[in-house]
Amino acid sequence: MRDETLSEDKTNGPPSSEQYFERTVDQAVTAAVLEAIGPTRRQVLLGLGAATLSALVADIFPLRTLKAFAADPVGKPEKKDVSIGFIPITCGTPIIMAEPLGFYNKHGLNASVKRAAGWAMIRDWTVNKEVDAAHMLTPMPLAITLGAGSVPTPIYMPAVENINGQAITLHVKHKNVKTASEMKGFRFCVPFDFSMHNYLLRYFLAEGGVHPDKDVQIRVVPPPEMVANLKAGNVDGYLGPDPFNQRAVYENVGFIYKLSREIWDRHPCCAFTVTKEFATTYPNTFLAMWRAIVDATHYASDPAHRKEIAKAIAPTNYLNQPVTVLEQVLTGTYADGLGNIKKEPNRIDFDPYPWHSMAIWILTQMKRWGHLKGDVNYKSVAEQVYRAADCDRIAKELGYATHQSTTTRHVIMGKEFDPNSADAYVKSFKIHSMA
């Protein structure tokens, strides 16, 4: 058959790229149909001519749908207008900055970020479908999925937002404190029970011989209220998210005792999450958000972009913080409250990959401190909630590096954690909820 579908239009000149694309699809489908129907019928249909044959095929085959899919194999979002809940902390930088810096728009979404007062509000918004996606602490999707502290709701965690990015901040009156053992009797606050802040603080104290449920007090305080509580003397310190560690220094009320990376370097902190229901009901919208977040997270990982990002997320509707405070956090050049200027470029970093081994470690600490009862299938829960393999697929599509495995060994305060020996790890601790 002569290739009439791709011939030049003598009236209007060469076909446009769109016309060429559509005609290529027509030709490919027609050729496939002719190949499938056998030589006798093929001979009859060939006599109809290309235009008539294409029209006949279109009547029985969904060419329009095929062309739409071929033109956009990713699939257009089922809903472009989406809302994403967030807490005003630097840990949520990719989710927040993706709005003013255009990453949601780049991936076909009209997204708005919605600020919450605390993590319980984020949890409730998610479970009650008041937002389409949410910024969460990395333990939260595990806890919500398992029904720890909430109604069981399957949650997907497609991407980590930040790694590191927390600190133990103490009141200025405790400048002489050097060790955990000197903190007995302290009153601490953390942003949520199911948080890396809580689990890292507990780990640090217990390694120093301090029982976090007997020797100190730990209570939940929303991040924006931490500095005020420190200033009022309601607490002696907190392991909290930035910018509230740096803000305590800025207001001359606290000092940075220890960065969380000194407890576990490259630990996860916050994450991008959706309910399983949303992901399956709006798969293209979910994937568009996922791509936007992975893209934004990699952008944030480049130190050259940090000052631009600080300016973008500083306004009232986002973090409502002085740009200088955010720059100190994001660049890692900061005042520590003890008269020193520190340079820690890895104070906070951004890596979207949700290692299953991170989830397993978190689950061991939930088990250790009585947040989970009974037997736990660590590996199964990690694979269900943390979408590591698919995150790598998204990263590869966007041109970013991928990983050889979904698990690795992590070092926490000098001790190696093997995700394949989770039960033995839990039992190895002398200080735990029942001790």
Image (spheres, rainbow, N blue to C red):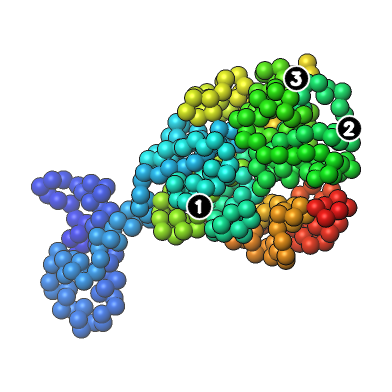
Q: How far apart are marks 2 and 1 (CA)?
A: 41 Å
Q: Which mark is residue 405?
A: none
112 lies above or below 360: above
337 lies above or below 267: above
Please provide percent x and percent y for residue 296: 52, 39
425 lies above or below 105: below
Query: Is 324 displayed left or right of 378 in the figure?
Result: left
Residue sitting nearer the eye, 430 or 16:
430
Are the residues at dot 2 and dot 3 in contact (C-beta closer than 8 Å)?
no
Q: Distance between the residues labelled 1 and 3?
A: 40 Å
Mark earlier in primary sequence (2, 3): 2
Q: Residue at x 88, y 32 (%)?
A: 182
- Please give the count of numbered marks on the rendered protein: 3
Q: Name the residue under label 2.
A: 182
Mark nearest the camera among 1 and 3 is 1
Q: Which residue is drawn at 25% across and 49% down?
A: 18
Are the residues at dot 2 and dot 1 in contact (C-beta closer than 8 Å)?
no
Q: What residue type is labelled 2?
A: Glu
Q: Residue 127 carries which label?
A: 1
Neighbourhood count class around disc 3 (C-alpha, 10 Å): few under 14, some 14–19, many 20 upward: many
Please provide percent x and percent y for residue 4: 18, 60
